[in-house]
Amino acid sequence: MPEPANTLLIEGSFEELAEELAQYLDNVKKTPAQQQQQQQQQQQSEEVGSSSLHGEVMRLLETNQKDEVLKRLVTTSTSLNSAPEKEFTQAYNLLVHLVRQSPNINMFLPRICANLSQPISSSPMNGAGMALSILSTIFNILQPDNDTRFHVFLAILSVVKNHGMYEVLRPQLKNLDRWIAEWESDEEDQQKLFLEIANVAEDAGEDEESYLYLLRALRTIPPNEASTPSARQLALRAVTSALSHPAHFDFQDLTALDAIQALRKSDATHWDLLEIFNAKLLDDYDDFVSSLSTTDNGNGNGNNWLESNHLSPTILRRKIRLLTLASLAANTPTRSLPYAQIAGALQIPADEVEMWVIDVVRAGLVEGKLSQLNQTFLIHRSTYRVFGERQWKEVGARLNVWRESLRNVLGVLREGREGGGRFLAGGGGGGGGGGVGDRREGIQGQVHGQGQGMMVGGGGGGGRRGGGRENNMGGGDAGYD
């Protein structure tokens, strides 16, 4: 919802505007024949019939009972949903303006929001946009820290969900954290809000965004409520969503939550399946499915259990293959995987290896290069599925190797500087130049051995010609004086 200045300009006193709106509501509620009959009755009598809203409002205004007037108007405002399209916005704006003048505004707005969440019968095509326009007006005229904004936003979510208008909502979600902080919403309200957004996103086909808001809802569950029925249902829904999404491969954020951990006891089968996708391989998945076949849950076929829990065996098997390949790449010390090893781990023919490697690269799990000549996959970068104590030790070991390599390189460079200094101090020529040139070649070989590609140039006399060529490639003596 855009946030312009909180201004709603309508001229007239409260009494005049309330009387005008009451008359309008009386007319909207009646058919054209009834409206004509009411006009004839009013011509015959100066008093408005006691049964009309207008009559009730006029009597209440005489005793200055403004809140009672607003109660009557708001209660009857459901009929505005059948008002002509060209009059709809003006009529609702008038009602909002009157309600805004009450010190008890929060008493009336929820009913108005509920009305706007219902279908607009007078405009099936444009009704949703018209309702969102009024709800946005209500949202924006309220102070930022007014927690009634929370209920208005829920009404907006209802309209968006019922009419598939998630793209209208998406740009505003960046403000959500700020709004929650301003409203000082408790965990229960936050969970309700996140679940509503997750539902809207799911209906719009935005499965990844829906899952992210499910996670946020799960995080609002305190540890002492992690095993409640509502927490269990939410946890199972999040597990199903994470496993079913073809492009979701990270499960550590899910397994760390208290409500998910509680599934160990309440829903052990779901927990075991989640653990397989979190850290295990294709063979473990096959064993899991086979074990389901021998239980009553599987009815002789493990896939039956998966399908009955809204899980696709095809999607799961493809995903676990990609994750298995990612684990192979991360755990291979040589950074090179033979095609035969990949084919065996993924249980696929050798001629499908390249297709699966391309898929795992597209999924962002691994980066590397295929060598058809050597029938190997050269790994440039891989993703650890689980990063625990063993992975930290591996990182520490690699850092130690790099540190030793850098020490060796620095030692070679120091020798190069010292050798270059002695040569320049002694001049050099003839056979002496050649001797220093030999030394440089030895240093150059050491540096190349460290993979740095640096060359030490210089020299004179008999060695000058060779040294000159090295200068052209390596940049001369300037860096070593």
Image (cartoon, rainbow, N blue to C red):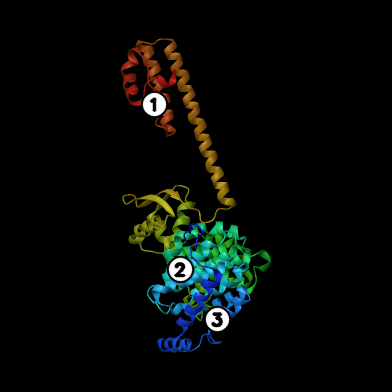
Name the quadrant containing residue 195.
bottom right
On screen, 47 above or below 315? below
Residue assigned mark 3? 296
On screen, 118 above or below 439? below
> In terms of depth relative to the viewer, which is nearer, 462 or 28?
28
> In terms of depth relative to the viewer, which is nearer, 260 or 289?
260
Q: Secondary structure at mark 3?
A: loop
Q: Visible in this render: residue 283?
A: no
Residue assigned mark 1? 455
As measured in the structure, the alpha-carbon distance from the residue carrying label 1 to the one carrying label 2 is: 70 Å
On screen, 121 above or below 137? below
Q: Nearer the viewer, mark 1 or mark 2?
A: 2
Residue at (50, 27) in percent of width and height: 411
Local packing at callout 2 (Cα closer than 10 Å; few below 14, some 14-19, many 20+) is many
Q: Nearer the viewer, mark 3 or mark 2?
A: 2
First in sequence: mark 1 or mark 2? 2
Residue at (66, 68) in percent of width and height: 225
As measured in the structure, the alpha-carbon distance from the residue carrying label 3 to the one carrying label 2 is: 50 Å
Amino acid, disc 1: Met
